[in-house]
Amino acid sequence: MEMLVASAIGLLTAAGIYLCLRGRTFPVVLGLAMLSYAINVFLFSMGRLIVDRPPIYQKGVDAYTDPLPQALVLTAIVISFGMTALVVVLALRTYLETGTDHVDGTPDERDGPA
């Protein structure tokens, strides 16, 4: 199970970095989202993958999972959703202002002069 989770983290990270290095804004937004998913899975796996254990301490329970990674991931999901919405709005505003969706703001060669 650990190998599967580590492979998923590596694949999400590699795809996120590849998309972040693209020249258009939409792949960059998708790459940032994939990187945030990879970080969330990494944070969740840091709490050890334990099955059939309660997340909080109860009477008569000798072992339980650590609730801190779960709380960190929940907080990170909310923050990454807000940041993704902000980046999408900024990318849309940049497209409307410049007329291109290139990250550096230069127009396409096939579009002709701006």
Image (cartoon, rainbow, N blue to C red):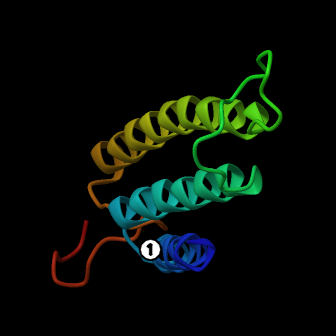
Residue at label 1? Answer: 19
Task: Estimate the x, y position of residue 103 in percent, counting from the top left.
Answer: 45, 65
Task: Estimate the x, y position of residue 41 in percent, counting from the top left.
Answer: 59, 56
Q: Is residue 5 left or right of residue 23?
A: right
Taking the spot 47% from the left edge, 54% from the top edge, the residue there is 33
Q: Is residue 89 left or right of residue 114?
A: right
Taking the spot 39% from the left edge, 47% from the top edge, the residue there is 91
Seen in the picture, residue 73 relative to 30 is either above or below; the reply is above
Q: Considering depth in this image, is 40 or 100 the residue closer to the camera?
A: 40
- The amino acid marked with disc number 1 is Leu
Q: Is residue 22 left or right of residue 1?
A: left
Seen in the picture, residue 54 relative to 24 is either above or below; the reply is above
Taking the spot 50% from the left edge, 71% from the top edge, the residue there is 12
In what quadrant of the picture does the N terminus appear?
Answer: bottom right
Taking the spot 55% from the left edge, 75% from the top edge, the residue there is 17
In what quadrant of the picture does the C terminus appear?
Answer: bottom left
Task: Estimate the x, y position of residue 92 in percent, counting from the top left.
Answer: 33, 43
Q: Considering depth in this image, is 90 or 67 the residue closer to the camera?
A: 67
Q: Name the residue furthest front.
A: 60
Seen in the picture, residue 3 relative to 83 is either above or below; the reply is below
Q: Name the residue furthest left.
A: 111
